[in-house]
Image: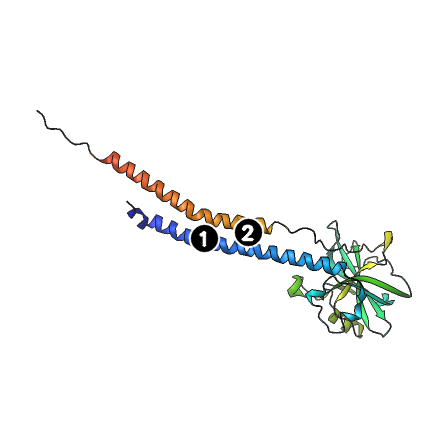
Amino acid sequence: MYRFLLTRQWVTLTLLALVLIPTMVELGFWQFHRHQHRVEQNGLIARNLDAAPVPVEELTSPGHTVPRADYWRTVTATGTFDTGHEVVVRRRTNADDRVGFHVLSPLVLSDGRVVLVNRGWVPAADDQKAFPEVPAPPRGAVTVTGRLKADETTGASGIRDLAGLPPRQVMLINSGQQAELLDREVLGGYLEQTAPASGDAGPEQIPAPDHGSIGAHMAYAVQWWLFAAAVPLGWVILVRREKRDRAAASGQNTPEPVTAAA
């Protein structure tokens, strides 16, 4: 009755099912791990944003790579902005998804070292090669509060570090690159400024990272696992239907017995 399973059509269908089942299970675990990562990251962001501010020098130093455990930690830095070496970071969006620049300003600390401060977003000029209009930072000594972030790299961000950019424009926020331009010691990582507030004059400060939503990754994981469970079930249903159809066709093709004449 089941010899039809050895036909090319059914062998192909069975092999396809055997491939789909582990693939869908693996896709389910991939989404599940993304869900776990999102939950862990949300917890990390919430803990670090709620932590008491500390001086930036306690968490980073020149050449230091900011570890993930310190991302979004609230830190303070006191110094004087060096507007002469201010640069803008290309192709950045604001909360409304408008494309413009982030303003990266060196803050010179009392010991002469520098910490980079991302003061926020400004719109692009009509000419993309022109330096945009950037509101000036406070003059004199100022204490800046912000969220500590790690240096950006192409590998981590996916942003290509293009060559031949217009003067004072960069693609990545990277303390190593800025240390070469400034010829000073620059603390690793940078600050996303939250205080003092820039007000209506700008730049538009970067909002806190979202840590309240977990996305639909868990729902997608369950969906993939349900698909994986449905494959063998569907295979069995198709086999039984094929068997029934073949049996019915065989019964219809069986000739009726001939009755001898009396």
**What residue did someone put label 1 on?**
21
Under mark 2, the amino acid is Ala
Q: How many marks?
A: 2
Of 116 and 258, which appears nearest the observer? Answer: 258
Q: Position of residue 29 (x, y in %)?
A: 54, 56
Q: Is residue 85 visible?
A: no
**What residue did someone put label 2 on?**
221
Residue furthest toward the left? Answer: 262
Disc 1 crowd, CA 10 A, few/some/many (<14, 14-19, 20+): some
Q: Earlier in the sequence, mark 1 or mark 2?
A: 1
Residue 155: mark? none
Specify the color scheme. rainbow
Residue furthest toward the right? Answer: 140
Q: Position of residue 38 (x, y in %)?
A: 64, 56
Q: Say if mark 1 contacts mark 2, CB within 8 Å.
A: no
Q: Residue sitting at 73 percent across and 57 percent down?
A: 92
Under mark 1, the amino acid is Ile
Question: Relative to 98, is 118 above or below?
Answer: below
Of 43 and 8, which appears nearest the observer? Answer: 43
* The N terminus lies in quadrant: top left
Q: Residue sitting at 50 percent across and 48 percent down?
A: 226
Residue furthest toward the top? Answer: 262
Q: Residue sitting at 42 percent across and 48 percent down?
A: 232
